[in-house]
Image (tube, coloured by chain):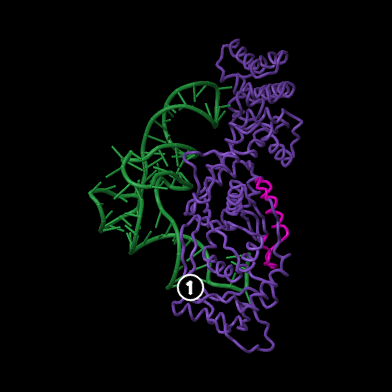
Chain colours: A purple, B green
Amino acid sequence: MTVRTRFAPSPTGFLHVGGARTALFCYLQARAAGGIFILRIEDTDLERSTPESVQAILDGMDWLGLDYDEGPFYQTQRFDRYAEVTRRLLDEGKAYHCYCSKERLEDLREEQMAQGLKPRYDGLCRDREDTPKGVKPVVRFRNPRDGVVSWDDRVRGPITISNDELDDLIIARPDGSPTYNFTVVVDDADMAVSLVIRGDDHINNTPRQINIYEALGAALPEFAHVPMILGDDGARLSKRHGAVSVLQYRDDGYLPQALTNYLVRLGWSHGDQEVFSREEMVAAFDIANVNRKAAAFDSDKLDWLNQHYMRSLPAAEVARHLRWHFEKAGIDPESGPGLEALIGVQADRVKTLREMVDASRVFYEDFGDYDAGAAKKHLRPVAEPVMRALGNSLEDLARWEPESLDQAIRGVAGELEVGMGKVAQPLRVALTGTAASPSIDKTLWLTGRERSLRRIERALQFILARAAAGA
RNA sequence: GCUCCCUUCGUCUAGCGGUCCAGGACGCUGCCCUCUCAAGGCAGAAACACGAGUUCGAUUCUCGUAGGGAGCGCCA
């Protein structure tokens, strides 16, 4: 039997890291078995579902490289099917109409809570014979009253829940629209899903769903409930606390390879291995080895992985993503050094592509004022002869390459009998406006000859003006 | 309140009765390298929640306790 997994988000918000990890697990488990990965959009909540959220989910999946084999299916397009199955359960006596008002149900719940009982429907309409007029009924599933429901969770191990903990859940509202626990079962059965991987907040729904499967006479899938992800501080992720769209990570300059690698290692491991290519993940991943406890999201480790991938992925691949960030920042990549060369120099120095853009802007556009502290410290009168010597030496340099540039600068330092620091730092400020940049030869190389000479001249004028003002 | 679930360094984890005075990674600290900032190299601090069992022997098995989480909707 081929493995069929599915990721079934509801489009009531963006795709956050918890959902992304669940999707990744579903994807990997299917790929590992040569199976099928299905995407299903659970949009039965018309109130809260939005087209924007659907798009955000699709874009997120796409950015992460989680390609699905079937779908996306939309539950709103399957209402006829749900109605058909509801009809069948009604006909077979496996479901019944319930005329209880919301008010009565609320009172019942309160009363049970007050008595220290677990609130659940008391079954008033379960064996009702009459049909009250003027009330549109809901449809309830006739849950077994005795016995237990057990399953062997692929992550949690054996779980057993007694049927007397359960009640007759509503599967269709008065207007006929179906509810979650019912649509999930109908869809997973229809789509022949063999392994349901989802967040562990669904553990409590599982026994209800198993009962519905049995009422339907459908084959039971396996279940795997993965723990949720906590925020940096160990607190639960929520909309207002740490839960951000995976697309935010894209915008912040993370590579999808880094995020998926980070996510796969959250709650799962394979010996001491930290870095996994997609192929390695597929080969090594097994949902059964996923941990049971919730894991806290550590952005420092994500940063480390991101830098690792910026350095180790083929430069062309990194450049593809970097170009996107250049465009987003409004910088023309053609107005400076080639992106692959830039990555070769900058990847060691930044954690994200966005930082790389910020740190590299100076190679593509003119900068404004010098950093005050850096200028004060390095663009002093003593630097005047250094600037002049550099200008002369670099103007006619045969090859504008890091190696020859390094030689030229060392030549200037030797000639003036000063240390490298006395030459490199003023030059660095002259070229970038700041006291920190790649090694000085690389900085010159990336800046380019014309732009470098212009900036050396500008620094010289700055030093002279300052000397004049000070004198 | 009731039901279910979870518990190894700050964080992610290895461990599946002796190999563990607990290993790796991120982060942190120190040193080295050095034209700045990084990167890199080396070294270091840092954990089995607690209590009973079972056993010759428990991080590993069982049961409690404590702490944490989830669910209990005509939301998904």
Secondary structure of the residue carrying tag 1 is helix
Q: How many marks overall?
A: 1
Q: Position of residue A149 (x, y in %)?
A: 49, 68
Q: Residue at x 55, y 56 (%)?
A: A237
Q: Vertically, is A312 above or below A140? A: above
Q: Quadrant of the N terminus of chain A?
A: bottom right
Q: Which residue is at the front of the view, A439 or A211?
A: A211
Q: Residue at x 57, y 57 (%)?
A: A198
Residue B13 appears left or right of A439: left
Asked if residue A65 lies in the magenta stretch, the reply is yes
Q: Vertically, is A296 above or below A398? A: below
Q: Position of residue A357 (x, y in %)?
A: 67, 36
Q: Position of residue A177 (x, y in %)?
A: 69, 72
The residue sitting at the front extreme is A1
User: What's the amino acid at mark 1?
Assistant: Glu
Number of other residues with Cα within 10 Å of mark 1, as a class: few under 14, some 14 to 19, many 20 or more: some
Q: Which residue is at the front of the view, A319 or A423?
A: A319
Would you name the residue on which mark 1 appears? A165
* Residue bounds of the magenta highlight: A41-68
Q: Which residue is at the front of the view, A376 or A194?
A: A194
Rendering quarter of residue A261: top right
Q: Vertically, is A376 above or below A3? A: above
Label 1 chain ID: A
The residue sitting at the top extreme is A415
Q: Position of residue A398 (x, y in %)?
A: 72, 13
Residue A83 appears left or right of A424: right
Q: Which residue is at the front of the view, A54 or B43?
A: A54
